[in-house]
Image (cartoon, rainbow, N blue to C red):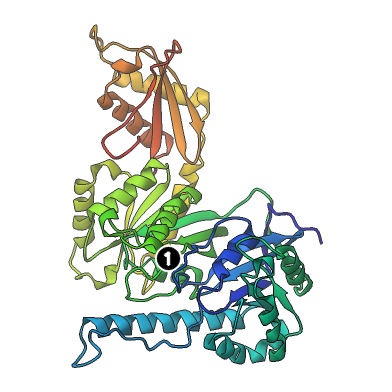
Amino acid sequence: MEFNPEIKYRNLPVVVLAGRPNVGKSTLFNRLLHRRRAITDPTPGVTRDPVAAEAFIAGKPFRLVDTGGFKLDRSRTTAAGTKGGPGPGRINAEAGDALDDLVVARTLETIRASDLIVLIFEAGELAPEDEEFIGLLRPYQDKLLAVVNKTEGGRRESEAWNLLAYGFDEVLMISAEHGDNIADLEAAIIRRLDFSAIESEAPAGERPIRIALLGKPNTGKSTLSNRLTATEASIVSETPGTTRDVVEGSFSYKGRSFLILDTAGIRRKTKVNERVEYYSVNRAIRAMDEADIVFLLIDAVEGLSDQDKKIAALAHDKGRGIIMALNKWDTMPQIKNSFTAVSDRIHFMFGQMEFAPILPVSAATGEGLEELLKTALRMYRQLNLHIDTAALNHALEKWLQESPPPSGPQTRFKVKYAVQASENPVRFILFVSRPQAVTETYVSYLRNRIRRDLGFSMIPLELELRNSRKDPQSRAARPGPGLRT
């Protein structure tokens, strides 16, 4: 069977990269994908959730998974709080221990479901974690591939051969950072996988609807991702900042495929003081570029914050559809018309986003998710709607008659015609005689009529003004500070 990189496949063989922290799993993950997908940093334990992506090597597709590092000692405590009761240090240590346990448990679950385990070691003597991990993986000996990383230029290879004493049939020496012997590793991976069960999922060119889950830390993004995908792909913990990489998941609804991008919580820049969190936040923001629609998760108890508004503004600037999901609604007092009151308050606080739907949901119980997905399908259709130029200008003529442009000597201008320049993001161009004379009020009027009359009621749209005489001083219309259109 010949495979096409443009076609989505199911039943892909699964290759898991495993090992203790800081042996180079994420660097190898990025190397095999030929792109930066996982966060890499010298800090041990950067990867927590299993990060998966489809790899395509030597004409063969498979699912590649980067896992969190296996730690032998997960009972760390800090000096503060270890004696005399549960002080802050002890509490933080216990939270860290619980999170480490979750990371290791998820790593072992991922390994059990894999078709091939690439067990990665660092060049040099084996660490206690390496030996314990080898023992744990004995039941999977037939699907283990031992790889020693950081052997660039033959560095410490002689010590690496000692791994053969642990029963491995072969040991590969590589450098994920420099690319040494990666071709040999790729060939070994392909040799040990069975591709016979793979089936095509969708025709070339038909891709899933891509949803980015965004919001502040601890708003329930990972819980929602797991609920929608019916998996435990994202680690859920009360520890803020648990998610670091973008964790992908997929599911189907009403015959449509969806891809979920679970992202790290976005805090104010002034509170981001760790390099790893900086990378995580930037990955979360870049996930908007890959998405069609953003589910902005807002803590229903806390309400809309300035940070939520900034996240929505970023998504709006990129032309993404935005649904504000008031999560944890099941914890709110059951008072009549309470949702209407909360929605009205959000619209009052954030008038520029009045078109964006607001929905009450509970990621924990599943309440409201049916309506959330129905709204996402309607929004996706609007994002990809194209209006014929003739129909657009017929509507424009009607709008101009109902509310003519100003006629004063300084404010006079003529709207010649309009075209829709793009879909997803949606962009219109108006050709006018004097762009500098067009007021923001009149631009808002035309934009609102486009939304109301042409079927773009739920999405952001850009309305650009161009001089019909090809004046180089054309400009893009802007509705207000912080938003592009």
Residue 158 placement (x, y as % from top left) = 70, 79
Residue 125 placement (x, y as % from top left) = 59, 83
Residue at the spot of label 1: 244
Q: What is the quadrant of the C terminus in the image?
A: top left
Q: Nearer the viewer, residue 29 or 418?
A: 29
Crowding at mark 1 (Cα within 10 Å: few <14, some 14-19, many 20+): many
The answer to which quarter of the image holds residue 18 is bottom right
Residue 112 placement (x, y as % from top left) = 60, 83
The answer to which quarter of the image holds residue 185 is bottom right
Q: Is residue 412 depicted above or below 263 in this figure? A: above
Q: Is residue 308 depicted above or below 157 in this figure? A: above
Image point (31%, 17%), residue name:
436
Q: Nearer the viewer, residue 469 or 275?
A: 275
Q: Residue at the right extreme? A: 1
Q: What is the quadrant of the N terminus in the image?
A: bottom right
Image point (53%, 86%), residue name:
129
Q: Residue at the top extreme? A: 409
Q: Amino acid at mark 1?
A: Arg
Q: Is residue 355 visible?
A: yes
Image point (68%, 90%), residue name:
166
Q: Nearer the viewer, residue 285 or 183?
A: 183
Q: Is residue 312 depicted above or below 481 in this figure? A: below
Q: Secondary structure at mark 1?
A: loop
Residue 243 placement (x, y as % from top left) = 41, 68
The answer to which quarter of the image holds residue 415 is top left
Q: Is residue 47 left or right of residue 116?
A: left
